[in-house]
């Protein structure tokens, strides 16, 4: 399994926070439920909204969250920023290769 660089993780989580148009707490709930539905994570409590803010700036986001965010962005967001598009594509390519959550 190839690791996802922190810069890519941050870009994807940041894009998810922006494009979900939800409060940080609501975005965390959406991300967690989407991750569970898609099989990126076992059932879990959503992280606090502040975790998404930290994952987008300084902390390393967990792989399940990054995979779920990239998949959600691909399905539901109209991305136009080339850096966001590239980050999502990198993560989705990893999902296709079978990265484990």
Image (cartoon, grey):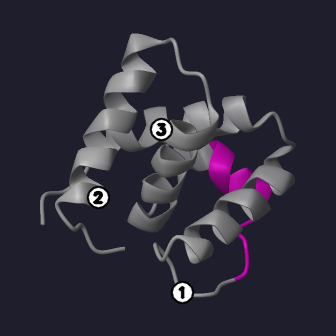
Q: Nearer the viewer, mark 2 or mark 3?
A: 2
Q: Label 1, label 2: how many angstroms apart (C-alpha)?
A: 16 Å
Q: Which residue is mark 2?
A: 95
**Residue 17, labelled with which disc?**
none
Q: Name the image quarter holding residue 5.
A: top left
Identity of the residue furthest to the bottom in this view: 43
How packed is label 3: few (under 14 Cα within 10 Å), some, or many (20 or more)? Answer: many
Closer to the camera in the image, 54 or 69: 69
- Which quarter of the image is occupied by the C terminus? bottom left
Label annotation for residue 42: 1
Viewer-proximal residue among 52 and 96: 96
Looking at the image, residue 36 lies above or below residue 68: below
Position of 98 compared to 74: left or right? left
Which callout, 2 or 3, points at the residue further toward the start of the chain? 3
Please state the horizontal and vertical placement of residue 49, each as a whole percent of the image. 77, 55
Q: Position of residue 65 (x, y in %)?
A: 51, 60
Quadrant of the rendered structure where residue 67 is?
bottom left
What is the magenta range?
A: 45-53
Left or right, 28 with respect to 80, comes to right
Q: CA distance from mark 1 to mark 3?
A: 21 Å
> Is 46 included in the stretch rendered in magenta?
yes
Residue 23 visible in image: yes
**Residue at image point 62% right, 31% down:** 77
Residue 56 visible in the displayed image:
no
What is the spatial separation of the Cα atoms under label 2 and label 3, in whole angstroms? 14 Å
Evaluate if marks 1 and 3 touch, with contact meaning CB atoms under 8 Å apart. Answer: no
Reading the image, the residue beneath label 3 is 12
């Amino acid at each position: 399994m190839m690791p996802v660089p922190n810069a890519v993780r941050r870009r994807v989580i940041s894009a998810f926070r922006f494009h979900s148009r939800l409060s940080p707490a609501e975005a965390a709930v959406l991300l967690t439920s989407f991750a569970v539905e898609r099989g990126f994570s076992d059932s879990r409590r959503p992280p606090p909204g502040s975790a998404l803010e930290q994952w987008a700036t300084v902390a390393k986001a967990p792989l399940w969250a990054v995979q779920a965010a990239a998949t959600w962005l691909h399905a539901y967001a109209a991305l136009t920023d080339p850096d966001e598009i590239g980050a999502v594509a990198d993560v989705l390519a990893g999902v296709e290769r079978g990265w484990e959550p």
